[in-house]
Image (spheres, helix red, strand yellow):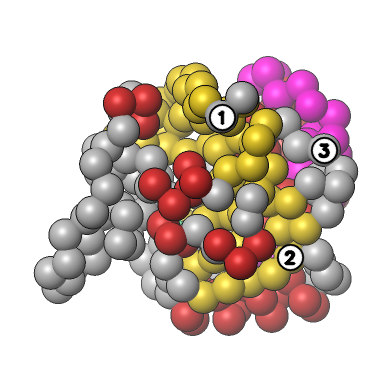
Amino acid sequence: MNTRDDRSAMVRTQLEQRGIRDSQVLDAMAYVPRHLFVPEAARRRAYGDHALPINEGQTISQPFIVALMAQALRLAPRERVLDIGTGSGYAAAVLSLLVGEVYTIERKPALAEEAERRLHQLGYTNVHVITGDGTLGLPEYAPYDGIAVSAAAPWVPLPLRQQLGEGGRLVIPVGGRDTQLLLRLTRTNHQIYTERLGEVRFVPLLGAHAWQPAGSSIPADDEPAPDARP
Ligand code: SAH
C-alpha cells in the first residue's frame, strides 16, 4: 500500500472531480494520513470513497464529507474552530492545518482518549481534545470563527448558535435520524443566515440540546428555531 499515492488519487477523484476547489483544503486532505485514524482491520479501505467504522459503534466520515465541511467553513489561518464529535480525530486533524486552534469535543471517553493520543503522536499540537457533551459547546473559549458538527442533530443546538462569533460559520447536519441536510449558518450583523449544502447521513448527536441518549429522562430544552429547520 502506498498511502501517499492513495491520498493523491483520493484528492483527485473524490474531491477535485466533485467540486472541492479550496486549495488549502485539498492540501490538508492530501497531507493527513487517514489510514492512521482507522482501526487496523479497515486500513486497506482507508482511502476508499466511504465512511468507515471506528470503535464504540461510531464512524469516520467519508473523505468527501470532511472536505465539504472544511471548505464550507471558509477558514482563515489564525481562526479558532470548535469541532463536535471528535471520533477518530481525523476531521480535527484536517481542520488543524487550516486554522490557529481547534477545540474538539467527544462524548465517549474511550474515543476521546484514543484520538488525543493519536493526534499527539502525529504532532498536531494545536488540537485540544475535550471529553463532554458538545451540544453545550465550550463556553470557556467562545466565541468561535467556525463550528463543525459531525453528528446528526434534530435542530441547531442553542449554545452553538450563541458561541458563534460575529462573521462566524457553523456547519451542521440537521434532520431526522436517517438523513439530514447539511446546513451552514453564518452570523452577520447579529443575524443568522442559513444555507443548505445538500443531503448527508451522520450518526446521531446525543446530548442535552439534541437527541436524548438511551435511558436518559431529561427532555431537550431548546425549541427548534425557525431558521434551524431544514
Ligand atoms: N469527525 C469524526 C467522526 C465523527 S462520528 C472523525 O473524523 O473521525 C460522530 C462522533 O460524534 C461520534 O464519535 C460520537 O460519539 C460523537 N458524538 C455524538 N454526540 C456527541 C455530543 N453531544 N458531543 C460530543 N460528541 C458527540
Q: Nearer the viewer, mark 1 or mark 3?
A: 1
- Identify the residue position indicated by label 1 in the image: 190
Q: Nearer the viewer, residue 125 or 202?
A: 125
- In the image, is residue 25 part of the stretch drawn in magenta? yes
The structure residue drawn at horizontal position 64% and vertical position 42%, both measured from the top left corner, is 165
Q: Nearer the viewer, mark 2 or mark 1?
A: 1
Residue at 12%, 69% (x, y): give it. 217
Disc sitting over residue 76 in the figure: 3
Q: Image quadrant for the N terminus?
A: bottom right
Residue labelled with disc 2: 127
At x 37% / y 66%, what residue is drawn? 57
What's the distance in space between the residues labelled 1 and 3, CA to CA?
A: 21 Å
- The x, y position of residue 6, in whole percent, is 76, 45
Amino acid identity at mark 3: Ala
For the stretch drawn in magenta, the main secondary structure is: helix
N-terminal of the two: label 2 or label 1?
Answer: 2
Say whether mark 3 is within 8 Å of ligand 1: no
SS for callout 1: loop
User: Quick one: label 2, few (<14), some, or many (20+) residues within 10 Å?
Assistant: many
Q: In terms of sequence position, does the residue under pointer 1 or pointer 3 come before the other?
A: 3
Image point (79%, 77%), residue name: 121
Q: Which residues are magenta?
A: 17-37
Q: What type is the residue that disc 2 sits on?
A: Val
